[in-house]
Amino acid sequence: MLPKNKLGKSIIKKLKVFQGPNHDHESQQPTEWNPS
């Protein structure tokens, strides 16, 4: 949840969403985690 003020708007402006496993951030290699 984001605050509904200037802080929330600045967070949304900096948010980057990538479709699929390809992204520009080489150092970050997320892996799928399935709790069992």
Image (cartoon, grey):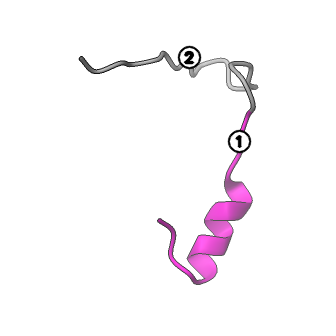
The magenta span reads 1-18
Q: Position of residue 7 (x, y in %)?
A: 57, 75
Q: Is residue 5 magenta?
A: yes
Secondary structure beneath label 2: loop
Left or right, 19 with respect to 6, comes to right
Gap between marks 2 and 1 measured at Cα: 15 Å
The residue lying toward the viewer, choosing from 33 and 29, is: 33
Q: Residue at x 50, y 76 (%)?
A: 3
Left or right, 33 with respect to 23, comes to left
- Can you say whether 15 is above or below 33 in the image? below
Label 2 packing within 10 angstroms: few (<14), some (14-19), many (20+) = few
- Can you say whether 10 is above or below 35 in the image? below
Q: Position of residue 17 (x, y in %)?
A: 71, 42
Q: Amino acid at mark 2?
A: Gln
Q: Residue at x 71, y 45 (%)?
A: 16
The residue lying toward the viewer, choosing from 20 and 27, is: 20
Q: Residue at x 56, y 81 (%)?
A: 4
Secondary structure beneath label 1: loop
Marks 2 and 1 in Cβ contact (< 8 Å): no
Q: Amino acid at mark 1?
A: Val
Q: Nearer the viewer, mark 2 or mark 1?
A: 1
Q: Which residue is mark 1?
A: 17
Left or right, 12 with respect to 1, comes to right
Q: Which quadrant of the structure image shows residue 25?
A: top right
Q: Is residue 21 magenta?
A: no
- Picture disc at residue 29: 2
